[in-house]
């Protein structure tokens, strides 16, 4: 393991030199990549220092014990050896996980889309519940959320809602939420007290930078229309809402939450870029998942991933067979425990794949 860590240290020193070079600073894409790499390597180098300290302590203690001439030092050496040996396995596990190659997408901000699926009004209400769950979760992580576009349901909730999330390692965390979420409960409109099953689809699109996706202006049709919904006097009077259609793929993105047409156009382009980027990413994830036989990230955006059963107070994640009887807290934003389990499974799969390193 120390050989691997020495390579990391060598690369860290290289990157430290590179990020202060003027030609690197002037190349935005390269500079962003290198500063991210620097940040990741910095944590690993700190772990390397801890590892060297522990292994040195073990070696030193073993030498004193083998010598055996100094009885006072002998007891201290035994304690030092015991302490160092107890801490080493956990440190090695932490380092192994950190040595897993990082997905470059994980650090990106995201655009989340929640769409009501089967189940009529109840599906829209459920989409609203999911939106509330994610905004509370993002708040607990210190991330910022900002609604881009929405279409309200007739009995509450949303037929569709898009919002952006900005913060640290947002995509790396929220990517596990993409897929079809099902709810089983008695709808407010149900008079017989029967349990209905409804669904909503969650899409998590990594926010693409200008240099990630090149969009040709000639490939985009731009339509302006009057925005609908809350917004005071400017609603339904000015053509401030923007709809973009990407002609080669047929993908559509729209934004109507700003009063300024220019701001709406910028936001709509951001969504369109992210959708095009996600198309490519889905193909890549499918290939990776097939290679790894992955339970977690199949690349299939229509896979049923989770069920929220209200009568039983149960949440089941079908990808890893995890069932938690803590529905109320989860729907109130406590999603972290599910994400931790999914992340653990993904890391284990990656460790297995990279086992030849160790």
Image (cartoon, grey):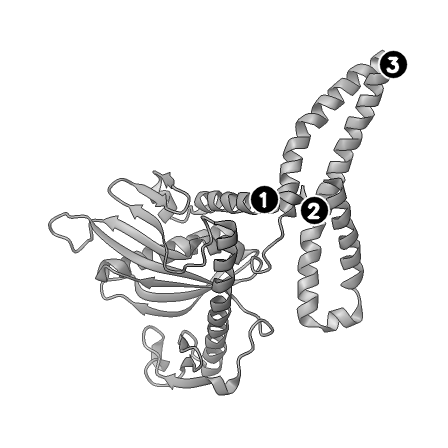
Image point 45% across, 82% down: which residue?
261
Label number found at residue 351? 1
Crowding at dot 3, Cα within 10 Å, few <14 / some 14-19 / many 20+, comes out as: few
Image point 24% across, 42% down: which residue?
311
How far apart marks 2 and 3 lie (CA) works out to 37 Å
Q: Are marks 2 and 3 in contact (CB under 8 Å)?
A: no
Label number found at residue 206? none
Q: Which residue is mark 2?
A: 44
Q: Residue 93: x, y in percent?
A: 62, 37
Q: Quadrant of residue 49?
A: top right
Label number found at residue 70? 3
In the shown orientation, is residue 205 left or right of residue 153?
right
Secondary structure beneath label 2: helix
Q: Nearer the viewer, residue 56 or 22?
A: 56
Residue at the extreme bottom of the image, as rendered: 218
Q: Residue 162: x, y in percent?
A: 40, 66
Q: Residue 128: x, y in percent?
A: 32, 59
Q: Are marks 3 and 1 in contact (CB under 8 Å)?
A: no
């Amino acid at each position: 393991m120390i050989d691997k860590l020495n390579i990391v240290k060598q690369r860290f020193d290289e990157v430290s030199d590179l990020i202060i070079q003027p030609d690197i600073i002037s190349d935005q894409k390269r500079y962003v990549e290198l500063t991210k790499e620097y940040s990741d390597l910095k944590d690993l180098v700190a772990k390397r220092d801890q590892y060297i300290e522990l292994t040195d302590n073990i070696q030193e203690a073993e030498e004193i014990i083998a010598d055996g001439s100094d009885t006072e030092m002998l007891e201290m050496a035994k304690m030092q050896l015991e302490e160092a040996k107890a801490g080493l396995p956990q440190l090695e596990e932490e380092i192994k996980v950190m040595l897993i190659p990082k997905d470059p997408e994980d650090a990106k901000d995201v655009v989340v889309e929640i769409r009501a699926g089967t189940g009529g009004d109840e599906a829209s209400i459920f989409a609203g519940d999911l939106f509330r769950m994610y905004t509370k979760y993002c708040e607990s992580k210190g991330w910022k959320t900002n609604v881009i576009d929405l279409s309200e349901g007739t009995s509450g909730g949303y037929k569709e809602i898009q919002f952006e999330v900005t913060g640290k390692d947002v995509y790396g965390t929220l990517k596990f939420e993409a897929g079809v979420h099902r709810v089983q409960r008695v709808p407010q409109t149900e008079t017989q007290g029967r349990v209905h099953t409804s669904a909503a689809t969650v899409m998590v699109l990594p926010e693409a930078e200008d240099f990630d996706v090149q969009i040709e202006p000639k490939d985009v049709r731009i339509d302006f229309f009057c925005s609908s919904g809350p917004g005071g006097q400017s609603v339904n009077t000015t053509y401030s809402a923007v709809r973009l259609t990407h002609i080669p793929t047929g993908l559509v993105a729209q934004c109507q939450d700003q009063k300024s047409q220019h701001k709406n156009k910028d936001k709509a382009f951001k969504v369109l870029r992210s959708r095009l980027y996600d198309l490519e990413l889905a193909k890549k994830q499918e290939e990776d998942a097939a290679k790894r036989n992955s339970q977690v990230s199949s690349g299939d955006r229509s896979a049923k991933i989770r069920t929220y059963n209200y009568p039983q107070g149960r949440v089941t994640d079908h990808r890893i067979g995890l069932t938690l009887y803590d529905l109320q807290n989860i729907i109130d934003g406590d999603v972290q425990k599910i994400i931790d389990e999914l992340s653990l499974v993904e890391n284990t799969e990656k460790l297995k794949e990279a086992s030849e390193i160790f």
